[in-house]
Image: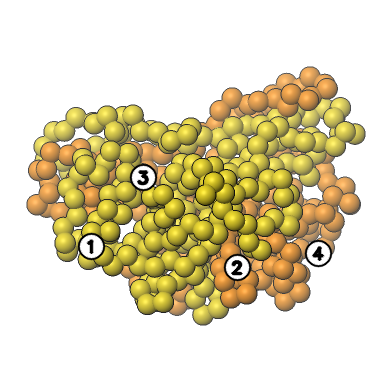
Chain colours: A yellow, B orange
Amino acid sequence: MTRYAPTARTTATRSPARVGYDREAVHRVLDEALVCHVGFVVDGEPVVLPQLHARVGDQLYLHGSTGARALRQAREAGLQVCVTVTLLDGLVLARSAFHHSVNFRSVVAYGLAVAVDDDEEKSRALAVLVDAVVPGRSTASRPPSRKELAATTVLRLDLEEVSLKVRSGPPIDDREDMELPYWAGVLPLLTSRGIPVPDPAALVPVEVPEHVTAWGRPGR
Amino acid sequence: MTRYAPTARTTATRSPARVGYDREAVHRVLDEALVCHVGFVVDGEPVVLPQLHARVGDQLYLHGSTGARALRQAREAGLQVCVTVTLLDGLVLARSAFHHSVNFRSVVAYGLAVAVDDDEEKSRALAVLVDAVVPGRSTASRPPSRKELAATTVLRLDLEEVSLKVRSGPPIDDREDMELPYWAGVLPLLTSRGIPVPDPAALVPVEVPEHVTAWGRPGR
């Protein structure tokens, strides 16, 4: 499979040229994003919470609090979710206020999230989640104990109903605005890291490891 | 009012010490964030889409596509939404995989979003939306025409049922892990800007204005 199959709700009604289903492009955006926003329904009303995510093939692991009721549902029948990831690439400044925009890449994935019960899968998922945030970190920290595993919630979503929306490039002004005396262009945005702050409670001196000093997002 | 009144769904069941309702603190997070994630329900299932937002007092204006059906609902009876904003401040690396975390500030706002119909309010909201992304920009671009206003959708949400969740500071490891030979600490994250890229289609030379060169997020 090189493309996710479009469905009614992953088909754009506006700006269809910006929407795609390419599997590798979707994966790149999911892998670059540090955080996702998970939406689900409680009592008929929407809830959106930030979570961490990690992808393994076409499975997305989610980690974060959802509240007790949504978690129970994920454990029992599964929880219908919409997982959305957004990378902001730049601010698009046009000559007209109307054509202002942002350059972004955004993935929306719908499906049934289920709680991972199997200890071995959960253990693997947690390592992948840690490495998704800081590559190489799972082997540079103490692995979870059985008790810690039991205290951790991981949800799994199969990537099937997925779309990618992208806006890139310069502003597009109306022809009659092109000679207005306003600067137009793109202000690129990037996520960068500051200087690592060692734990002030550290008892033993440990040099800052390469997986910290070399940290950056894939694809940037 | 200095605090939003907690409700059942804005009351934390886990980590209550991290959850607050201070109005000014909520406003600072909303004002610093460039993008929000808006959740709503279509056919009983969750949809989460990124949108731009701007706050005026206790009103939050939202701009972005929601799909035709949600928009119709926002125009008719109003659309129940959950608007979530997340600022990632740092990666928290503990000695144990289990205590890895992220430092973040996240606002969740529930309520009924309604479409702004009044041209004057919409016009003001659009100026505020443009200025929320690039302060000073609304007066440095051509204001929207009547036709452009009609083609633009803005939703308004009253901030009433709102909470703020914050995690900050160093990792908190178990005492028995403190002498493990792993580096622990925080890797701060920041959103920074690249070099402005002028529109390659520009017909008249315009110097990069100060609102672009001096761009930064409030509160950082």
Residue at mark 2: chain:
B
Q: Secondary structure at mark 4?
A: loop
Q: Say what amino acid the circle numbered 2 marks.
A: Phe
**Can see residue B108?**
no
Between the C-alphas of marks 2 and 3, the distance is: 28 Å
Residue located 41% across and 49% down the image? A57
Residue at mark 1: chain:
A
Q: Which residue is mark 1?
A: A119
Between the C-alphas of marks 2 and 1, the distance is: 34 Å
Q: Which residue is mark 2?
A: B40
Percent x, y for residue A150?
22, 66
Q: Are marks 2 and 3 on the same chain?
A: no
Q: Which residue is mark 3?
A: A132
Percent x, y for residue A51?
42, 57
Q: Secondary structure at mark 1?
A: helix
Q: Which residue is mark 4?
A: B117
